[in-house]
Image (cartoon, grey):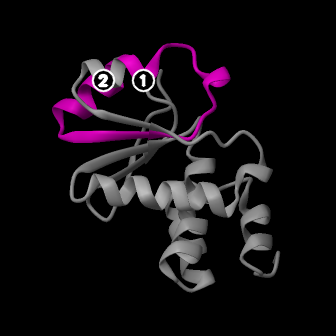
Amino acid sequence: MSPCQPRILEGRLYCAGQPDAQDLERLAADGVRWVVNLRPPSELAFDEADCVRRLGMHYVNIPVATPADLNRANARALHDALARAGEDAVLLHCGTSNRVGALIALAAAWEQGVPAEDALALGQAAGLASLEPAVRARLDLPLD
């Protein structure tokens, strides 16, 4: 069974774990036009980029392998990818949606000026889990 059970944010942003080819076909049929993958190529079991392109969607890879990759450059890259997508529906995924939530929170805070607590809540809604302490530290929020 695929871990791709998207949470939908803002009506167009599907946040999920790793999709398989069938998930991508279904999402393309549902109107998703962009796939932003936060997994490094070494974590992928199939040629996701090729599959996405064959389905007529755009593909962006922003590798986030470790908490050190939760940085301003990758937050900016995510912000830029979402801006390029415009109003199109986007699938943003990693393995479990944990990295998705982390980078969503950081991009919201650093690139959009969203207050830290609100950015953290957005990240949690997107799937932030075990990376929450790393995100809190980067946003200067208490660890609870």
User: Could you tell me if the residues under marks 1 and 2 are in contact, i.e. CB atoms within 8 Å?
Assistant: yes
Residue 44 screen position, x and y as percent: 58, 21
Quadrant of the rendered image containing residue 26: top left
Identify the residue at horizontal 33%, vertical 19% (top origin): 22
- Is residue 128 visible to the viewer in this orientation of the structure? no
Question: In the image, which disc is placed on residue 49?
Answer: 1
Please report the bounds of the magenta region as a residue range: 21-50
The residue most toward the bottom is 115
Above or below, 108 relative to 80: below
Q: Secondary structure at mark 1?
A: helix
Q: Amino acid at mark 2?
A: Arg
Q: For the residues marked 1 and 2, what is the alpha-carbon distance in whole angstroms?
A: 6 Å
Describe residue 137's horizontal placement relative to residue 128 as left or right.
right
Task: Report which residue position mark 2 lands on.
Answer: 53
Identify the residue at horizontal 62%, vertical 49% (top origin): 98
**23, 58: nearer the viewer:** 58
Residue 114 screen position, x and y as percent: 51, 82
Describe residue 33's horizontal placement relative to residue 117 as left or right.
left
Quadrant of the rendered image containing residue 50: top left
**64, 21: nearer the viewer:** 64
Q: Residues within 10 Å of mark 2 (few under 14, many from 20)?
A: some
Describe residue 99's horizontal placement relative to residue 19 as left or right.
right
The residue most toward the top is 46
Residue 97 screen position, x and y as percent: 55, 45
